[in-house]
Image (spheres, helix red, strand yellow):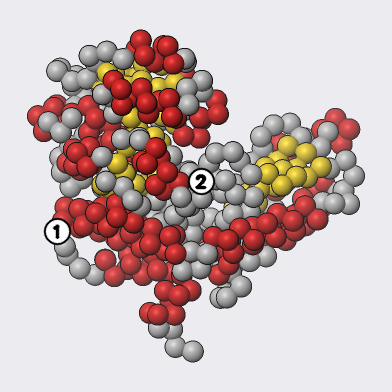
Amino acid sequence: MKTTRRRLIQAGALAPAAAAAAKPVLSAGTPSPLYQSLGIKPVINGVGVVTVLGGSIMPPEVIQAMEEASRFFIPVPELQKKVGARIAELLKAEAAMVTCGAASAISVGTAACLSQGDQKKLRQLPGRDGIRYEVIQQKAHRSGYEHQMELCGAKIVTVETRQELEAAINERTGMMFFLNKAEPLGQISSDEFVKIGKARGVPTMNDAASDATPKENLWKYTRQGFDLVIFSGGKALRGPQASGLLLGRKDLIEAAQPAMSPFGGIGRGMKVGKEELCGVLAAVERYLKADHQAEWRELEARVELIRKSLKSAKGITTERHIPVIANELPHVTVQWDEASRGLTSQQVVEKLLAHEPPIHVQRPGPGQLLISVWMMRGEEPAIVGRSLKEILG
């Protein structure tokens, strides 16, 4: 059967798990001449959409958009604005821009808040003269992403309570930073955070890089009142891995654009090519059309398959688990008593990594495994189940 553009788009509109039965699926065991030539083995991804394993697998229409974009020369700043406007429309935001990963969005968003649209101030970053350079965040939200703000000359001010937050705001405060996945850990809720920022005239940024599930989250946080919201382009959206989205206030997005390549701002090294720009747009369009209910059913089936594989293993407990925030999809937890079994979770992880193909999972603690089935393909869930049964049974 001849492959037409219509068929390609129709196939791509399905969520990855639902589409698996409709077309041949590559998996970790599929020979890859490219990676073989480099001496690298593809792995089974039981961790999820993480950068260290390459994020996600781009669907056909994303690859097609990037390939088409690569054939022409275009004015990149114009393309950035047109793509941003289209994404903003799709995600119900006032404005949007594509960045070089979610971490890049933190940097250029911080630059926008600190410079307040003043080109002179933007050019002097990370210099602080005349700039409101303090960024407030909760102690429980510290994660290592502070470096992306400090790159712009920001000084991080850490607070724990609402009273401390109120007291920390002064004439040097340029932004308030909220790490979405850490909300359960902090004492200040996102609603309180936004309310205080609005009342005191301080821009608020929400890093929701891994929180594009369910899809309604893509407009939930801007509607909540955050001035800037960040999502990864290469995780749940399944766009190019080195891409991110910055959504929010039009004036701040306009201030952030000249902070990044092809302009000579603080983010000149954070280049987004025409291929990534078109790829992210295609990814957003696909994600909004995808059959997420069908994908959910497939993920539940994968979870159940792995759990059934370990049902007869004595002393092993499995559960279906859905994270409260970030990657809110079905996972599998596996637990056992290390002392009675004489086998540590670290040893199990090492055995899985030595498997052919290697299997990557998370190890939350002693006698515990956390397995994401989200990015598994084909027979990979069955392979994981059999491997765990051999090791633990």
- Per the rendering, the mark at residue 75 is 1
Where 257 falls versus 56 (above or below)?
A: above
Q: Which residue is drawn at 40% across and 83% down?
A: 4
Q: Is mark 2 on a helix, strand or loop?
A: loop
Tag 1: amino acid: Pro
Q: Mark 2 points at which residue?
A: 50
- Per the rendering, the mark at residue 281 is none
Using residue 44 as the reference point, say whether residue 51 is left or right of it. Answer: left
Horizontal and vertical percent position of residue 87? 31, 55
Who comes first in sequence, dot 1 or dot 2?
2
Can residue 135 be seen at all in this image of the molecule?
A: yes
- Place residue 128 in its image quadrant: top left
- Place residue 195 in its image quadrant: top left
Where 327 falls versus 176 (above or below)?
A: below
Tag 2: amino acid: Val
Horizontal and vertical percent position of residue 305? 75, 58
